[in-house]
Amino acid sequence: MGSQHRNPCRYVLIAGDEYDLPAIRRLLGGLPEDTYGQVFVEILTERVQESLPAPERVAVTWLVRSRRASRIPLLPFADRGEPLAAALAGWATEWLAGADEQSAEHPLMWIGVAESAHVAAVQDLLLGPVYDQVRSLDDALDDRFG
């Protein structure tokens, strides 16, 4: 008979930028193979892009800042955190729409780029009233691997 223990890392959202890559790599390395979810990594140029070891059902999306226009006038390309915030908002619209506390499986989230106002605004929405009890991915991995 299979284990009745619920895997704490089944559904994840991991988001950060090039400065968060060591943490993202560590988090991905600790995930069970049956985990599914999304990783967004914002980078300045393609030169920073690297291979990340992720479970098969965890998609990794690279967001290249220098290829995107900014919403801020006079900037030659997107401000740090702009592409990531847009990706997180889109993800939330698709994956969290209509979710409620009783029926939805809440994702375990780790969101970097803490100093970006763009990301902070979206993070506040993601971790709003419905998701105020969402445990962090770091906590779940600590529970699993001590």
Image (cartoon, grey):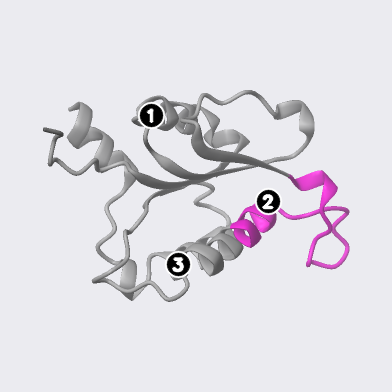
The image quadrant where one finds the C terminus is: top left
The foreground one among 114 and 34 is: 34
Left or right position of 146 against 91: left
Which image quadrant for residue 105? bottom left
**Which residue is pictured at 38% across the width and 65% down the height?**
127
Characterize the local packing of mark 3: few (<14), some (14-19) or many (20 or more) Cα atoms within 10 angstroms.
some
Counting from the top left corner in percent of width and height, residue 94 is at 55, 65
Whole-percent x, y for residue 91 in the image? 56, 60
Inspect the image, locate mark 3, and give the three-letter code of the amino acid beneath it: Leu
Q: Residues within 10 Å of mark 2 (few under 14, many from 20)?
A: many
Q: Which mark is residue 43?
A: none
Does the magenta-highlighted stretch encompass residue 71?
A: yes
The label shown at residue 96 is 3
Residue hosting label 2: 80
Q: Farthest residue to the front: give it.
A: 1
Question: Where does the magenta region start and end?
Answer: 64-87
Mark number, residue 33: 1
